[in-house]
Image (cartoon, helix red, strand yellow):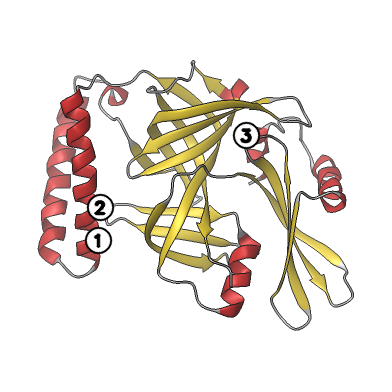
Amino acid sequence: MHQYLRAIGFSNIKNLHQLDRIHREIQRTPDRRMVVSRSLRSSLVQLNKDYGAGGIGLSVLGEMDSEDSFLIEHSFPYIQPGNYVHTDEVQVDKFNDRSGYYGMIDNINLSVIFTLINVAEITDYMWKAPLPSTLSVRLSGLSLGGDILLPLMKTEQDLQYECEKMKEDLATIHMIRHGHQELLDRMMLREMDLKDTIDHRIDTEDVLSIVDSSMIPSGLQSDVYDIIGTIVDMNEIENVQTGEHVMLLDVACLYYVIRIAVNKNDLHGEPDIGRRFHGITWLQGSVLLDIR
């Protein structure tokens, strides 16, 4: 996922030699360092360094042996999530090819998969006890580019109806998970009717004039999505090392509010609260844990 470095203001990194210099800097002066035992002879080390006031940064993961010899396994850019917390049944599993975890929220009609950025914290918790099935998560994402779209015209009644419908949908999903087959059948029929309505409107209208919020898997990576959502808050920050400007957009998408970082040079249009963001986004998240 090193191509997403440009999302946090490192568009000048073109090769592994440049990245290695940053890795060495993080090893010398990390902002946060966490060491967690994962066997009797080795420990997982996570080093984080922030490069902007809004929580953009780079995380280095590696292994340290009993003689304090440190070997880097991999690194990834991150954006710390905002304050929007979503509590749900979350499945957490390890990656097969590297240290780290991904989370999955199964919302019946869409399984939302995201890379967890607080790796050492989760490892520490799981070293002592299994994770609970219901977790509080905060979501964020990195985008390589996006378009700013005008909002759809809505009345106050429309907004109130959508809010009530979202609450109803979340309650329905919870009941379906616990065996209410009739509700599942009803939801599937409603989804089919909605699809027929959209298919009919697409014949005469542009899809972006119809869709207010969507999250569609994009490409081969399971945690990358084509996102459309409404901007509810925003901030412009500067990468303190490169001077590049990064836009932080809190985007309301489906049942979530996701803090998305995108290089200002890769954003088309003028962002503003109430307008929509549309872009391919690598979804990240952090699990709120009571470390014992």
Q: Residue at x 69, y 76 (%)?
A: 38
Residue labelled with disc 3: 7
Q: Is residue 228 left or right of residue 64?
A: left
* Front residue (pair 168, 227): 168
Query: Mark 2 belongs to which amino acid?
Result: Leu
Mark 3 near mark 2, Cβ–Cβ under 8 Å?
A: no
Secondary-structure class at tag 2: helix
Q: Is residue 217 above or below residue 99?
A: above
How packed mark 3 is, by other alpha carbons closer than 10 Å (few <14, some 14-19, many 20 or more), is many
How packed mark 2 is, by other alpha carbons closer than 10 Å (few <14, some 14-19, many 20 or more), is some
Mark 1 near mark 2, Cβ–Cβ under 8 Å?
A: yes
Mark 2 or mark 3, which is nearer the start of the sequence?
3
Q: Position of residue 144 (x, y in %)?
A: 57, 33
Q: Is residue 128 above or below residue 183?
A: below
Question: Which of pointers 3 and 2 indicates the residue nearer the eye?
Answer: 2
The residues tagged by marks 1 and 3 sit, at their Cα atoms, a distance apart of 35 Å
Residue labelled with disc 2: 170
Mark 1 near mark 3, Cβ–Cβ under 8 Å?
A: no
How packed mark 1 is, by other alpha carbons closer than 10 Å (few <14, some 14-19, many 20 or more), is some
The residues tagged by marks 1 and 2 sit, at their Cα atoms, a distance apart of 6 Å
Q: Is residue 97 at least partly visible in the picture?
A: no
> Image quarter for residue 248?
top right
Q: Position of residue 174 (x, y in %)?
A: 24, 61
The residues tagged by marks 3 and 2 sit, at their Cα atoms, a distance apart of 32 Å
Q: Is residue 66 left or right of residue 192?
A: right
Secondary-structure class at tag 1: helix
Residue labelled with disc 1: 174
Query: Mark 3 belongs to which amino acid?
Result: Ala
